[in-house]
Image (cartoon, coloured by chain):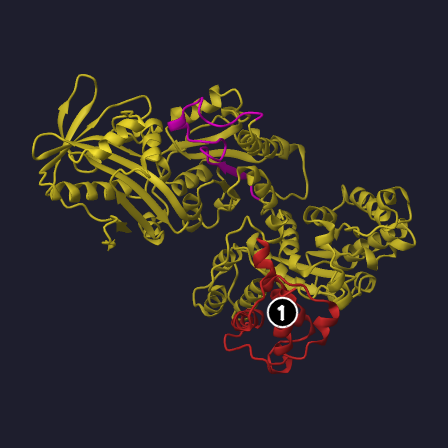
């Protein structure tokens, strides 16, 4: 069941329904290039998709279109089983890893002859590397492990000497069938014991050589040997593994090739709320975030932190991009007892209210890394997609609903593949001076307005009602950041507002193409004289910041106020330790300052004659008048 | 997956439209339409290896598994549809 993460490449977004059409269009496009190819490769492609993309790349090459910035790499492929689908799958998958791949495949079973003859198809192509895709059934493994290893050494020597190529050598996936059961591993002549011995010595052989390992044994164990080996497909066509796994296998090979060309990613940018810990620190407070041993959800987030720390140990630079108040966000790193990550582990720390694409660009600039070296981990699909669309070079893994799978998904994506590990790698993260510094933002990247319009947002306004009451009370009592007055009311008081016709109450929901965000804003206004409404409470979930929700709420407030004959709205900003982000809320919406109170609070007013420009979303007032505005 | 969905018999009027989509996707030809008498000889690129790819796509879409004998003895799309119907109905 959970093998689906791997089999379906679930860290990659689903391909668009018109994928084939996009391939055809790209093949014919006048201004096509490697960047467009890489973008099409960035989805979870099936074998059919991979074939189409590979055909597209061939068509572009035939037209003389260069595939830069993808880097050229020529790969020979030899094996002792059917590998017919592999070249096209590899060519398309390699584009996902920054490589414009060409393949030269030897005929079925031609292994030693290809390696030893200088004029063989593979050697005469002068490949950069040769993939030795070996299946346990085609090796002289049954006579002895040493013989099989000697055979592999001969192949490697042959391609190095006669083709000038390094070898990418697969380890062996043992069959799930045994003669002895658990005892099998202890019987030296059995397939299982021989595969294990072969793999162990192969790894020894390769260490310190120019050749690299493709650990197929590990891949097969990860998805399960019973999934990997398909007897029907072997009998029908000598496929060495279930061809449903071809996209996965091709991605694994492509990662290694990418790593050989230095395309592995170097920096992990982390979101904070609901990615590194459960909850929203600005609202829930230091004590309220979920991050503790013994709590299932807390353990899941600790595992994300542990994974980030392990990556840092091996030289991956860590950074933070979070929509948060800087001081509040840093408190968790400095003060929370369960945090594994500390500020000294973070090279650049961007906690602000700007969009994440702009922040990630600033991080990359600050670290002098390319955008194609960055990975961005965020639980919020709207943030993920905005970064993908604004900065397509940045890798942004899809994440499942369950935080327990975040760390595994990040690992499954293989962004940090390596073919060597040196002392220098170990120290690299330190070299980036992990002082959690802030990077200066430059011009905004990405078309935020266009992106908002593409979200198919649907906003719903309702007065308070019994169904919404519990959630309304919950929001009123826990929202700290986007909260103008931070007045707390009990559920009983909420019910009283609901029953009082003189009060204007509003519960706001927002849905978009990524799903329903549920209730995300609450407004309470009370009459202040016959023609004035005082906004007692206005709060919003930070999850929908930057989506123009507050503009639409004001637009609705004015609409309803006019219907009541109200001529002006007044509102108060009451500063707290946590709500600095809305200090300019009323000013930004066009309210005029009318009073500075001694407490530090400010009072604001806006006439209801003002027309507020509509944001790109449909509006539902529950009165059957669904307005497209 | 609820048992009721697994056990449901796939009606022929569902099989053919879905097969049309799969054929178009597998052989990259939007003009292909699944009909009982369609054979490999009628379709560009339908060889022994792409036949297996087609079968895998069918198996995935209809959540069925075929034996090697069934796969290699199929004569036309009509037989494939019949196989899907019976395998789904198990």
Label 1's element?
helix
The crowd level at tag 1 (other Cα within 10 Å; few <14, some 14-19, many 20+) is many
Q: Which of A200 and A160 is in front in this view?
A: A200
Question: Which residue is under mark 1?
Answer: B84
The colour applied to the residues of chain B in this rendering is: red
Q: Position of residue A10 (x, y in %)?
A: 56, 50
Is residue A120 among what the camera can see? no
The residue positioned 44% from the left and 42% from the top of the image is A380
Q: Nearer the viewer, residue A184 or A58?
A: A184
Q: Which residue lies furthest to the left in this view?
A: A530
The colour applied to the residues of chain A in this rendering is: yellow
In the drawing, does residue A388 fall left or right of residue A340?
left
**Is A95 located above or below residue A341 in the figure?**
below
Q: Which of A401 and A112 is in front in this view?
A: A401
The number of numbered badges drawn on the structure is: 1
In terms of image quadrants, where is residue A497?
A: top left
Is A249 colored magenta in this rendering? Answer: no
Q: Position of residue A581 (x, y in %)?
A: 30, 30
Region of the chain picked out in magenta, as a range: A265-294
Is A266 colored magenta in this rendering? Answer: yes
Q: How would you classify the magenta stretch by its main secondary structure?
A: loop
The residue positioned 67% from the left and 59% from the top of the image is A75
**Is A330 located above or below residue A36 in the figure?**
above
**Is A310 located above or below residue A262 in the figure?**
above
Q: Which chain carries label 1?
A: B
In the drawing, does residue A341 fall left or right of residue A559?
right
Q: Where is residue A119 in the image (x, y as percent from the top left)?
A: 77, 67
In terms of image quadrants, where is residue B39?
A: bottom right
Q: Where is residue A460 in the image (x, y as percent from the top left)?
A: 29, 46
């Amino acid at each position: 069941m959970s093998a689906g993460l791997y089999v379906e490449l679930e860290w990659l977004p689903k391909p668009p329904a018109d994928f084939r059409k996009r391939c055809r269009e790209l093949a014919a496009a006048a201004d096509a290039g490697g960047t467009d190819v890489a973008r099409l490769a960035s989805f979870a492609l099936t074998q059919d998709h991979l074939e189409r993309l590979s055909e597209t790349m061939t068509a572009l090459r035939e037209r003389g279109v260069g595939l830069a910035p993808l880097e050229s790499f020529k790969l020979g492929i030899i094996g002792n089983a059917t590998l017919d689908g592999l070249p096209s799958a590899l060519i398309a998958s390699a584009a996902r890893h920054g490589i414009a791949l060409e393949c030269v495949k030897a005929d079925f079973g031609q292994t030693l002859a290809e390696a030893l003859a200088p004029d063989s198809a593979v050697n005469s192509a002068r490949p950069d590397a040769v993939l030795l895709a070996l299946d346990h059934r085609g090796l002289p493994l049954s006579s002895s492990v040493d013989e099989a290893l000697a055979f592999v050494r001969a192949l490697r020597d042959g391609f190095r000497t006669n083709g000038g190529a390094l070898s990418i050598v697969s380890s062996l996936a043992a069959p799930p069938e045994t003669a002895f059961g658990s005892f099998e591993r202890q019987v030296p002549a059995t397939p299982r014991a021989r595969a294990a011995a072969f793999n162990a010595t192969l790894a020894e052989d390769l260490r310190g050589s120019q050749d690299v390992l493709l650990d197929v044994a590990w891949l097969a164990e990860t998805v399960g040997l019973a999934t990997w080996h398909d007897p029907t497909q072997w009998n029908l066509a000598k496929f060495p593994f279930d061809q449903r796994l071809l996209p996965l296998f091709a991605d694994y090979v492509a990662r290694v090739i990418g790593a050989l060309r230095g395309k592995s990613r170097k920096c992990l940018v982390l979101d904070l709320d609901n990615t590194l810990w459960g909850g929203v620190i600005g609202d829930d407070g230091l004590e309220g975030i979920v991050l503790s041993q013994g709590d299932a959800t807390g353990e899941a987030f600790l595992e994300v932190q542990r994974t980030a720390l392990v990556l840092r140990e091996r030289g991956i630079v860590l950074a933070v991009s979070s929509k948060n108040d800087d001081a509040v966000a840093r408190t968790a790193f400095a003060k929370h007892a369960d945090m594994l990550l500390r500020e000294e582990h973070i090279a650049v720390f961007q906690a602000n209210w700007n969009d994440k694409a702009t922040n990630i660009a600033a991080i990359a600039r600050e670290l002098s890394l390319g955008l194609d070296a960055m990975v961005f981990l965020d639980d919020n699909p709207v943030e993920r997609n905005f970064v993908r669309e604004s900065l397509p070079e940045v890798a942004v893994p899809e994440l499942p609903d369950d935080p327990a799978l975040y760390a595994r998904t990040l690992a499954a994506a293989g962004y940090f593949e390596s073919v060597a590990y040196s002392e220098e790698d170990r120290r690299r993260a330190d070299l980036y001076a992990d002082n959690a510094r802030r990077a200066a933002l430059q011009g905004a990247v990405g078309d935020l307005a266009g992106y908002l319009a593409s979200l198919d947002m649907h906003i719903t306004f309702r007065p308070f009602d019994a169904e919404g009451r519990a959630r309304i009370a919950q929001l009123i009592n826990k929202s700290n950041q986007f909260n103008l007055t931070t007045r707390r009311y009990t559920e009983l008081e909420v019910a009283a507002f609901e029953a009082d016709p003189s009060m204007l109450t509003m519960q706001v929901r927002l849905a978009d193409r990524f799903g329903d965000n549920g209730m995300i804003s609450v407004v309470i206004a009370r009459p202040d004289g016959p023609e004035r409404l005082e906004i007692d409470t206005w709060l919003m979930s930070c999850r929908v910041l930057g989506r123009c929700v507050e503009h639409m709420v004001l637009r609705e407030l004015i609409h309803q106020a006019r219907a009541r004959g109200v001529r002006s709205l007044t509102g108060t900003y009451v500063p707290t330790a946590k709500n600095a982000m809305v200090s300019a809320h009323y000013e930004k919406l066009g309210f005029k300052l009318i009073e500075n109170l001694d407490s530090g609070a400010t009072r604001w007013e806006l006439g209801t004659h003002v027309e507020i420009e509509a944001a790109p979303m449909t509006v539902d007032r529950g009165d059957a008048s669904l307005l497209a505005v | 997956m609820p048992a009721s969905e697994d056990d449901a018999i796939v009606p022929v009027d569902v099989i053919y439209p879905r097969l049309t989509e799969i054929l178009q996707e597998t052989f990259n030809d939007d003009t292909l339409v699944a009909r009982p008498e369609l054979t490999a000889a009628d379709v560009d690129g339908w060889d022994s290896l792409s036949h297996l790819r087609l079968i895998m796509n069918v198996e995935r879409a209809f959540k069925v598994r075929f034996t090697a004998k069934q796969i290699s003895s199929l004569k036309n799309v009509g037989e494939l549809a019949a196989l899907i119907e019976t395998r789904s109905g198990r």
